[in-house]
């Protein structure tokens, strides 16, 4: 890891680095291992660091500027030769495996805490072609302003899946569940524990309830087989005398197959999400009619 010279009270200089001595190739290899990526490192002795940085900018648009600086500095060895900092400071450096695992866990926590109704609106980045990039993830979000109260809207959302289905294109959901079972996944056969009651940890078809706030938020994490990880958010909030309803698909692709999967299913999002919105409205209107509410 990189060694830093830190002056202390103008009388001492300490070198601070990680617990492991690793190369950039070693860092990439450990990250690939933890992400479940199969990667082969091919040495290219005639490629200069500058050309490597240009290639990195081409294939890795995210954080490309930072990556270029790292690549351009690869010719410089930066290892700790003076271990006195370990004796003076109580903080002990982490190893590369622990550091990468911690960074990935922190990213997951950040995603789980995100309210897309706020994040996307404040960023001024509503829907874009192929979704909005958010770190390594892709986000596709749809929202509607409805004239019903948040509780009226959230009630059918809370009852989604199982015998009730997904309010639209249930055949597509069954096909996706069948495909999942063919490759050893859970498919749709699990259904729900209860037709409408929701608790964190519950299974809803091939999803798992990760977060639940009554009349406000339902966060589902996917448990079907796919080249990556996926989440489905349902968010409801007050808007004047009605509600703002947002449905958001978040996908964290693994490798090229993960990106190909996202591009393959993305065109269906518009149909499915808009179908769910229409199904929610039909369900709410039916419930109002049965209860005599105009």
Image: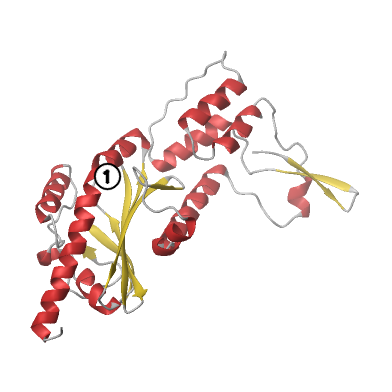
Q: Nearer the viewer, residue 250 or 148?
A: 148
**Residue drawn at (12%, 54%) of the image:** 169
Q: Quadrant of the C terminus?
A: bottom left
Badge 1 crowding class, 10 Å Cα cut-off, few under 14, some 14 to 19, many 20 or more, is some
Q: Nearer the viewer, residue 176 or 147?
A: 147
List x then y, in percent, for residue 92. Answer: 66, 52
List x then y, in percent, for residue 184. Answer: 17, 45
Residue 91 falls in image quadrant:
bottom right
Q: State whether residue 5 appears in this view.
A: yes
The color scheme shown is secondary structure
**Residue drawn at (21%, 47%) of the image:** 268
List x then y, in percent, for residue 43. Answer: 51, 19
Looking at the image, residue 292 lies above or below residue 134: below
Q: Nearer the viewer, residue 51 or 103?
A: 51
Q: Quadrant of the N terminus?
A: top right
List x then y, in percent, for residue 281. Answer: 18, 69
Looking at the image, residue 288 lies above or below residue 283: below
**Tag count in the figure?**
1
Looking at the image, residue 181 lies above or below residue 30: below
| Residue for badge 1 | 266
Q: State whether residue 195 appears in this view.
A: no
Residue at the farthest right position? 11
Residue at the farthest bottom position? 292
**Residue drawn at (39%, 63%) of the image:** 117
Relative placement, left or right, of 192 versus 141 is left
Residue at the farthest top position? 46
């Amino acid at each position: 890891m990189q060694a830093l010279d830190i002056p202390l009270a103008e009388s001492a200089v300490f070198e601070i680095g990680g617990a492991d001595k690793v190369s950039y190739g070693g860092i990439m290899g450990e990250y690939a291992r933890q992400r479940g990526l199969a990667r082969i490192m091919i040495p290219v002795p005639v490629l200069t660091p500058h050309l490597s940085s240009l290639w990195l900018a081409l294939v890795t648009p995210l954080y490309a500027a930072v990556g270029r600086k790292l690549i351009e500095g690869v010719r410089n060895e930066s290892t700790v030769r003076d271990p006195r900092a370990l004796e003076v400071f109580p903080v002990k450096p982490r190893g590369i495996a622990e550091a990468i695992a911690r960074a990935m866990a922190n990213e997951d926590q950040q995603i789980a805490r995100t309210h897309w109704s706020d994040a996307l609106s404040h960023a001024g980045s509503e829907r874009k072609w192929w979704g909005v990039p958010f770190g390594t993830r892709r986000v596709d979000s749809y929202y509607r302003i409805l004239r019903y109260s948040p509780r009226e809207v959230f009630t059918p959302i809370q009852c989604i899946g199982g015998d009730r289905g997904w309010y639209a294109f249930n055949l597509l959901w069954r096909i996706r569940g069948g495909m999942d079972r063919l490759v050893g996944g859970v498919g749709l056969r699990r259904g729900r524990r209860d037709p409408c009651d929701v608790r964190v940890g519950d299974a809803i078809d091939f999803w798992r309830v990760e977060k639940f706030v009554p009349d406000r938020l339902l966060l589902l994490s996917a448990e079907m087989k796919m080249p990556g990880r996926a989440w489905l958010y349902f968010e409801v909030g007050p808007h004047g005398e009605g509600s703002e309803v947002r449905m958001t698909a978040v996908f964290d692709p693994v490798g090229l197959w993960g990106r190909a999967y996202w591009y393959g299913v993305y065109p269906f999002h518009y149909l499915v999400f808009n179908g769910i919105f229409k199904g929610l409205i039909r369900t709410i209107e039916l419930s109002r009619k049965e209860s005599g509410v105009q």
